[in-house]
């Protein structure tokens, strides 16, 4: 999927908005878009960003130490 960045967007904000998380996703977006943020972390308005398909987050088992 391709989206267009809004004024002042960062890759982290886009990942949170579209994937609901940043862990493990931000790196995939950078790999899919070489040179995306060369020089500045802010994207320009209208800049095209390719969002690759990513696997769902791994569910971690919650361990309770006390009942």
Image (cartoon, grey):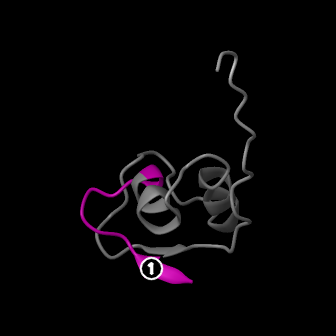
Query: Which residue is outermost to the bottom?
Result: 1
Q: In which quarter of the image is residue 33?
A: bottom right
Q: Which residue is drawn at 61% across and 46% down?
A: 23
Relative placement, left or right, of 3 versus 54 is: left
- Compared with residue 34, is residue 62 higher up or lower down, i.e. above or below? above
Query: In the rendered view of the protein, which quadrant contains the C terminus?
Result: top right
Q: Residue at x 58, y 73 (%)?
A: 51
Residue 32 falls within the magenta-colored stretch: no
Circle 1: element type? strand
Which residue is denoted by mark 1 in the rendering?
A: 3
Residue 45, compared with residue 25, is above or below; it is below
Q: How many marks?
A: 1
The x, y position of residue 66, in whole percent, is 66, 16
Is 7 a magenta residue? yes
Report the span colored magenta: 1-12
> Would residue 59 appear left or right of 2 to someone viewing this image?
right
From the viewer's perspective, is 54 left or right of 7? Answer: right
Horizontal side of residue 41 vs 29, given as left or right: left
């Amino acid at each position: 999927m391709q989206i267009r960045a809004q004024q002042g967007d960062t890759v982290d904000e886009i990942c949170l908005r579209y994937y609901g998380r940043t862990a493990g996703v931000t790196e995939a977006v950078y790999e899919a878009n070489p040179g995306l943020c060369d020089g500045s972390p802010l994207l320009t308005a209208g800049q095209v960003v390719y969002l690759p398909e990513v696997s769902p987050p791994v569910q971690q088992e919650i361990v309770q130490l006390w009942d």
